Amino acid sequence: MTRNSLERRKVFLGRLASLPVIAFVVALALLSAACNNVNLAGEERGSGTVSLAIDEVLASEIRSAIPAHLRSTTGDNSTYTLTASIRGDYSEEKTESATEGSLSGVTFTFEGIPTGKNIILDVTVKVGDNTIWYGNSGKHMVDSGINKLNVEVGRVSGVLLWKPEQEGKQPHDVYIAPYGNYASPFQTKFGIDTSTSQGTRRPYCFDSNGNLYAVQSASPNSQIKKYDSQLDGTYVEGSAPVDSVSYPSDVSYLAYDNDSGKLYGLGAGTSLYNLNDNVNITNNTTFSQPLGLAIHNGIAYVAEVSEGNTSGGIYVTLHQYNLTSTAGDTSQKTEEIRLPEVFGTDVSALTGHMIYQDGALYLSIGRLEIVLDESSGEGIAGYSIGAVIKINAATLAIEESFGQNGYLGLLDSSEGINGKECFAPTAKNEGTYFYGPMGFVAVMPKKLVLADSGLAMRKPDDETSTNVKLSKKTRIVTIDLETEAFESVPMDGYYEPTYSTGCGFVN
């Protein structure tokens, strides 16, 4: 497969409406992604029926798509759990199990769906408890007659977890766990290093098959590791994707181009590099404070953050580069965005990460900071906020229909606590706002998976205290791109924020 997982190859497998079942390629074209037609057949009484089935042709394609190195570990009797569910104005779910040999004939039938209902059809495939494929139809209103829905299904990667810094030990330990199954994660051989200027992680990225690429060590040259995703949700260390290169040791972002199979890197104060060929893409153009890197279909996108000069505030400059152009002719487009005032003026308080998904760029930005009064040193304000910004990949403009004016999950109002201005979600609204997104820790079709880490702020139990009580909040947040809804899982012991309390803010 040569395309990003978020631009999936569509395979239309719908049958004529007169046939009793509809061929459904669910999730298992294992080295590609699939798309199918699902018919909602209207009836005179104003309801419809959804019928989904896998025929022998599809089952054969599924079996042949499993690569040899995975077949040797899974065998022909691997059990797949297939779940089809309808949500929205109407809800229903069905689950079936099958081995590779019995996939043919698996059928889902949903009867009596009223016309006029707005629905989304989800399809999930698991091996054991591990989610490995997912897709949904997008929003659809059931109409009379035949309604055709396209369900695109793609690979779900593992989720990166990292533990807090232990005293005297750098970097942090990093693990990979199957999405939704975090009890027994696989420990990697690279770590999260908070001693660098970028501060939040060793650089990493995923490809369209869920494989992980990460900088294992940074000195004297960047050492890159690859971890291969397995069908059972585990990861095994693969061959090095690139040899050691003469590249700066402070690499802060990696991105993989599924179109060319090349790995790219970017560091503070450095150019964008093709790591496979050791080629300087942007020549003398360097990025003093990069905030994110994404690559899709031969186009590189760089986000760079800077403080405003005379106007104040923080600006994000987005750059677009054509990786197939000759040297000296790569720059295509540049766009500047001024962040909302709630992000402050200090870029060192920000975390950022960017990916390309489902036809758009998504940039996460978090701010974790205790603001002190310059004259007294007294803590006067606390910030534990963040957002995901949706950006048009062609124009580099913010997609204002996403979230609030293009910013999803951003808390821009404060709560006064003991005379201090506090910007942080509360228990009542944390299902809508971020505490501080630290980056995209998995890839999943039509969803965003982020580590969210920050501080809850409240009055201390001691009513005589004038302080603000800080409590660590760490979780994995999944954003449904169809509904923009939050789904979060607490992750105590992972992603814990590094911060210094200020006078008046206490643990």
Image (cartoon, helix red, strand yellow):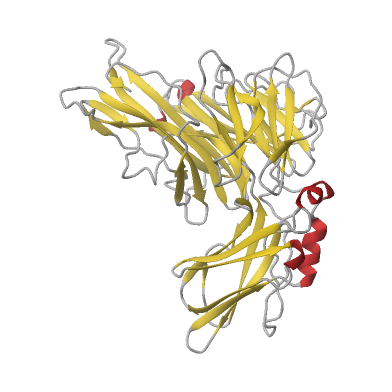
Q: Nearer the viewer, residue 259 or 20?
A: 20
Quadrant of res 197? top right
Residue 308 visible here: no
Return the x and y of residue 72 as percentages of the image width and height.
81, 49
Return the x and y of residue 267 as percentages of the image width and height.
65, 22
Return the x and y of residue 507 as percentages of the image width and height.
33, 23
Judge left or right: residue 139 versus residue 344.
right
Position of residue 401 relative to residue 333, above or below, is: below
The residue drawn where x is 33% and y is 17% is: 502
Quadrant of res 263? top right
Q: Nearer the viewer, residue 226 or 346?
A: 226
Residue 126 visible here: yes
Position of residue 234 relative to residue 200, above or below, is: below
Return the x and y of residue 415 as percentages of the image width and height.
26, 34
Residue farthest to the top, as pictured: 375
Judge left or right: residue 368 versus residue 196.
left
Residue farthest to the bottom, as pictured: 44
The residue drawn where x is 69% and y is 26% is: 215
Count every numbered label the image shows and give the total. 0
The residue drawn where x is 39% and y is 24% is: 369
Position of residue 366 relative to residue 449, above or below, is: above
Q: Nearer the viewer, residue 11 or 453?
A: 453
